[in-house]
Image (cartoon, grey):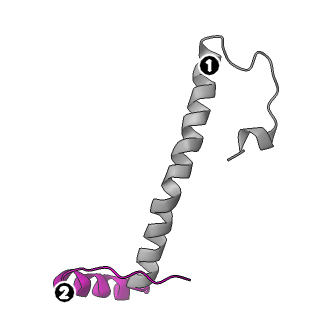
Amino acid sequence: MANLTISVDDATLKRARLRALQRDESVNAYLAEALRRYADAGDAEDRMARVLAVAEGSRYGTGSGGRKWTRDELHRG
């Protein structure tokens, strides 16, 4: 696992530590999860764009043409 160093002002870090303590979590765990969500957001946006493109094609008669999609085809990344 890699380490990441960030710079933040003392007051912000103090408030973050208090909030993490209230939520029974660590600032490190919170930031790691936030970074995972940030990194994964592009994948979700790409999948949604493909779904919307298929839906728009179907609306205007350029869709599947009666083709039956498999689950794997629909969820391919």
Residue 58's spot in the image, x, y percent? 65, 18
Q: Is residue 7 left or right of residue 62?
A: left
Q: Which residues are magenta?
A: 1-26
Q: Is residue 16 left or right of residue 51?
A: left
The residue indicated by pointer 1 is 57
Q: Earlier in the sequence, mark 1 or mark 2?
A: 2
* Residue extending furthest toward the top: 61
Image position, residue 39 (x, y; %): 49, 61
Instruction: Give the camera-side residue of 1 and 45.
Output: 1
Q: Is residue 68 left or right of residue 30?
A: right
Query: 10 Å neighbourhood of mark 2: few (<14), some, or many (≥20)?
Result: few
Q: Nearer the viewer, residue 7 or 20?
A: 7
Secondary structure type for disc 2 = helix
Q: Is residue 38 magenta?
A: no
Disc number for residue 73: none
Q: Which image quadrant: the N terminus? A: bottom right
Mark 1: secondary structure = helix
What residue sits 45% from the left and 68% below the top? 35
At x 41% / y 80%, what residue is drawn?
4
Residue type beneath disc 2: Asp
Residue 21 drawn in magenta? yes
Find disc 2 in the rendering and name its residue. 10
**Amino acid type, label 1:** Gly
> Marks 1 and 2, Cα distance to the nearest angstrom?
53 Å
Q: Position of residue 38 (x, y in %)?
A: 45, 61
- Residue 7 lies, in percent from the top left, at 26, 80
Residue for point 44% across, 85% down: 25
